[in-house]
Amino acid sequence: MAESHTDNPAPRRRVRFSIRLKIVAVLTGVLLVTMTINGWLLLRDQRQTMLKEIETKGHTTVRYVSQSLVYSVVGYDYHTIQLLLNELASNKDIVYAVVKSRSGNTMAKYGSRDSENHYVREFRDPITADGDKVGEVILGITTKPIVDRIDQQKVTLITRELLTILVIALGEFAALSLLIVRPVVTIANFLDRNVGKDGSIRKQSLPIQSSDEFGTLATMFNGMMERLDDARSKLNEKINLADRSLQETNEKLQSMNAELQRLSYTDMLSGLMNRRRFDQELDGVLKYAARYGEANSIILMDIDRFKRINDTYGHDVGDEAIKVVSSILRDNVRETDLVARYGGEEFVILCRGTGRDEAVTIADKLRRMIEQTPIATTYGFINVTTSAGVTSLGRLDEAPEKRELLRRADAALYYSKEHGRNMTTHDSDIEVPNGSVGTMTPEEKYASAS
């Protein structure tokens, strides 16, 4: 295929022969007949093939971009997203690129979308994280250069290629084998030896030295490798920086989640675990006791005449009394025991591996410590007392339900309330008629507590 052009004076000493000129020189004696029909069919197939390649390239490119932007879109890293789109600008075939969030808002874009440009093919791909769509990438790739090039070649082939199949086959075989296939094989072997599975290219020079396009291609390729190496180093630095930033953010989130979880299980006034957490722990202890026969005891403690304290001194003094009692309980229970504020002025202690006598001793010790600890208020020092109810589960006893165990401790507590307060009662020392809690009605309990 010959091409008419005007040679410009070359500044270099060596005469530069293009690939097309070399092919013309080889095929001058054999290109006698044109193949208009064959050329037209060839160009039509070529156009379809190249358009399919554009389609494949578009889907592959938009998929690669969507996968590369997952963490940036999830983290709303607009800067990194825009940097990647700016890098896409170096590809002249990409007319525009848009990245949208889950809600359809544009996070970054490059170029402009022209709905009247019928040469542009649009490709979309969702950005997904753990199976959820978090955004979308839209790329517009133009097919105009390919269409223009094929149209130009069509005119040339129709007017010039009048060669027979055999002559064209023989001539092209000789020319392509010598001038094109050999350099292409050299390039393919070079890439096979120097391109890793991860896409990295070893820093080697393409071993082609000639004055034609392959020589120019080799020079450009070697220069491009230098630039790619620099770009890869800078990109790795950015990736490492982003990884460190992401790791720091994850650590902060984990710390915040741990703190939120702690707060969800903590009573804010007393600093003890709340009733919800205690009930969860008690469920686990009862299951363990049922399987391994462990002895356990529960102590319920209640501040005596707490309503009178609030009515006499105010709720601030009542809150201070709860804080002091909570501090005494927290600092003087054993490491294996669990203590919680169970509601209002009531506290509960789970004594693991503890039988009846030891649990009563622990409750009495704590009750005396509270009684002997003065509480500083604006009215001076005051003392409070507590009543305690204890229930125990022996090693060989069948573990009752949680409600039953707490009912027994509650019955013992209100027995202490009925019989003078500031005392400790074990439920085995009293009778609970008809499964009721204590011997007082709810109205009597509140009246007695005041």
Image (cartoon, rainbow, N blue to C red):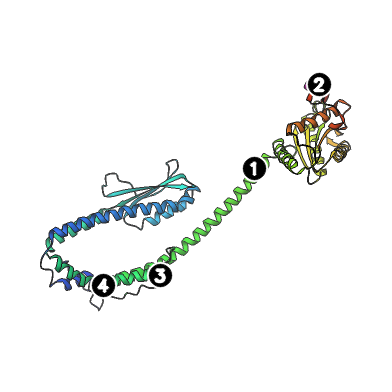
Residue in front for this viewpoint, 404 or 342:
404
Q: Closer to the N terminus: mark 1 or mark 3?
A: 3
Which label is found at residue 260? 1
Label whose residue precedes the other's in the sequence (4 or 1): 4
Label number found at residue 212? 4
Q: Residues within 10 Å of mark 2 (few under 14, many from 20)?
A: few
Quarter of the C terminus within the rendering: top right
Q: Would you identify the image quadrant in which residue 350 lies?
A: top right
| Above-or-below relation of 213 to 316 | below
- Examine the rendered structure and indicate whether residue 393 appears above or below residue 200: above
Q: Pointer 3: what residue?
A: 194
Tag 3 or tag 2, which sits nearer the N-term? 3
Q: Secondary structure at mark 1?
A: helix
Label 2 – label 1 distance at C-alpha: 39 Å
Q: Is residue 256 above or below residue 91?
A: above
Which callout, 2 or 4, points at the residue further toward the start of the chain? 4
Report which residue position mark 2 lands on: 444
Residue 312 vertical position relative to residue 10 in the rendered view, above or below: above
Q: From this viewpoint, is residue 217 visible?
A: yes
Q: Residue at x 19, y 58 (%)?
A: 42
Q: The disc labelled 1 sits on which kind of residue?
A: Leu
2 and 4 marks in contact (CB < 8 Å): no
> Which mark lies nearer to you, 2 or 1?
2
Residue segment shown in magenta = 439-445
Picture coordinates of residue 155, whole percent (x, y): 15, 58
For the point 27% across and 74% down, the residue is 211
Give the SS element for disc 4. loop
